[in-house]
Image (cartoon, grey):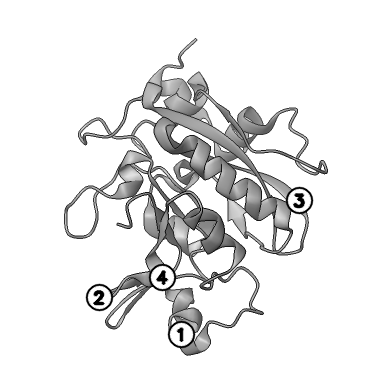
Amino acid sequence: MILTNRCSRAIGAAALLFLLFAGAEANARGAKVTAEPIPDAVWAYMQGRSWRPELPCPGRDQLVLLKVPYLDFDGNAQTGALIVARSVANAVAAAFQDIYDSGKFRIYRMSLIDEFGGDDARSMAANNTSAFNCRTTDRGAMSRHAYGMAVDINPVQNPFREGNLTEPEAGRAYDEPSKRRRDIIGIIVDGDVVTRSFARRGWRWGGHWKRSVDYQHFSNDGH
């Protein structure tokens, strides 16, 4: 049963997590990325947050929910959630499976951006790894996230930088090549398991951009 708007507003972040992960074995060895249709309650919660009817974003049947095993900054196995376009779900799932199986990379947290009201700045400041968000860029164009075809990973350790602007603010400690050492937990560097896993599926890294640089960002078309 689809929830009413009143019910959807009543679902807090803790309740949403319960809906997503009830019965999940987050700490199981050999955990696998799984994909499923977006549950009614999650879709209701997305309204006005990560999904906005005034923008030409994919509908529910064009999106899927991924439950993704990952190692947190303490090395503990967790299960996160991402929503991506159905057309790229296999590629994203395979990339994150490679990352998890390698045991070499840590992710701080991975929650639906709806927990931050669909606010990209708040999600980045919380060092949250996320994917789908029906939004425009600062220049007014549709973001690749709005199509479910981009992923941002550990935004603090992998910030966006353009000129004197660094987002999130805490990312200033990591926004220059000279600051980006391989021994920093959660940092993405050229040739590591993260860049190789996405490149294997034809996805491109924002760390290779020229005019600006977006170390957290991977997309299916490089934008």
Write the residue at 64% across / 51% down: 98
Of circles 1 and 3, which is in front? 1
How far separated are the C-alphas under marks 4 and 1? 10 Å
Q: Kindly identify which residue carries mark 4.
A: 207
Q: Residue at x 62, y 79 (%)?
A: 182
Residue 9 visible in this rendered orientation of the protein: no
Residue 220 is situated, as x and y percent measured from the top left of the image, at 37, 49
The residue tagged 2 is 211
Three-letter code for the amino acid on which mark 3 is drawn: Ala
Q: Secondary structure at mark 1?
A: helix
- Residue drawn at (58%, 33%) of the image: 16
Dot 2 or dot 3, earlier in sequence = 3
Q: Can you tell which quarter of the image residue 36 is in?
A: top right
Determine the CA span between mark 2 and mark 1: 15 Å
- Residue 186: x percent and y percent? 61, 68
Could you tell me which secondary element the residue under label 4 belongs to? helix
Label whose residue precedes the other's in the sequence (4 or 1): 1
Quadrant containing the C terminus in the rendered view: bottom left
Dot label at residue 177: 1
Please, which residue is most extreme toward the top here? 1
Question: How many numbered marks are there?
Answer: 4
According to the image, label 3 marks what residue? 77
Tell whether label 3 touches label 1 (CB within 8 Å): no
Q: Are marks 4 and 1 in contact (CB under 8 Å)?
A: no
The 10 Å Cα crowd at callout 4, few under 14, some 14 to 19, many 20 or more, is: many
Q: Residues within 10 Å of mark 1 (few under 14, many from 20)?
A: few
Against 95, is 15 above or below?
Answer: above
The amino acid beneath tag 4 is Gly
